[in-house]
Image (cartoon, rainbow, N blue to C red):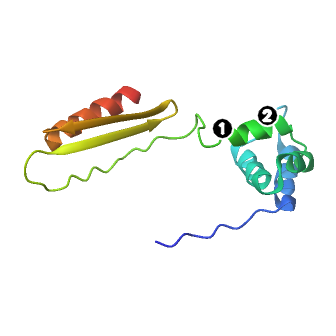
């Protein structure tokens, strides 16, 4: 499947977005996530200090938000995980890998049925949900 091309943001566009938001905000409301994302995208390309100065942002906070971007607490876990069970003869063998912020859990099962694997997956999934 071909990748879709996303348009590259310019400093001027993001400055205009920040100016628009600053002109409309009331009180000391937090900067919206979409503005932080745009600033982070520019900072990865142009450098944190340059973008922080251009957008009148705290460079340290921009850097921290960029570092936390992939592991944001607001990341929504998938609602559906497809389980494809290969047709085999003999005893089934599975390896389940679960990746999270604190590391990877790998479970290797031999001689279990697909139904057992589904029950185990549901139990693990409900434990973290």
Q: Is mark 1 on a helix, strand or loop?
A: helix
Q: Residue at x 79, y 34 (%)?
A: 29
**Is residue 123 left or right of 44 when viewed as pictured?**
left
Q: What element carries label 2?
A: loop
Q: Which residue is drawn at 19% across and 55% down?
A: 86
* Mark found first going from the N terminus, 2 or 1: 2
Q: Where is residue 93 in the image (x, y as percent from the top left)?
A: 19, 44
Q: In this view, does 51 lie above or below 71?
A: below
Mark 1, Cα crowd under 10 Å, few <14 / some 14-19 / many 20+, is: few
Q: Position of residue 27 (x, y in %)?
A: 85, 32
**Is residue 113 left or right of 53 when viewed as pictured?**
left
Residue 33, picture quadrant = top right
The residue that mark 1 highlights is: 68
Mark 2, Cα crowd under 10 Å, few <14 / some 14-19 / many 20+, is: few
Q: In which quarter of the image is the C terminus?
A: top left
Spot the residue most to the bottom: 2
| Distance in Å between CA atoms under marks 2 and 1 | 21 Å
Q: Residue 29 carries which label?
A: 2
**Is residue 59 left or right of 101 when viewed as pictured?**
right
Q: Position of residue 77 (x, y in %)?
A: 46, 40
Spot the residue most to the top: 127
Q: Is residue 9 above or below residue 109?
A: below
Q: Which residue is drawn at 35% across and 47% down?
A: 81
Q: Residue 7 carries which label?
A: none
């Amino acid at each position: 499947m071909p990748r879709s091309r996303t348009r590259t943001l310019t400093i001027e566009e993001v400055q205009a977005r920040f100016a628009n938001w600053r002109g409309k905000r009331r009180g000391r409301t937090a900067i919206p996530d979409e503005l932080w994302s745009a600033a982070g995208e520019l900072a990865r390309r142009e450098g944190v200090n340059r973008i922080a100065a251009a957008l009148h942002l705290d460079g340290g906070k921009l850097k921290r938000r960029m570092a936390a971007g992939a592991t944001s607490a607001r990341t929504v876990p998938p609602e559906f995980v497809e389980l494809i069970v290969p047709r085999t003869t003999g005893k089934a063998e599975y390896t389940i890998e679960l990746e999270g912020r604190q590391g990877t859990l790998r479970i290797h099962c031999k001689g279990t049925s697909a139904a057992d694997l589904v029950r185990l997956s549901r139990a693990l999934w409900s434990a973290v949900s």
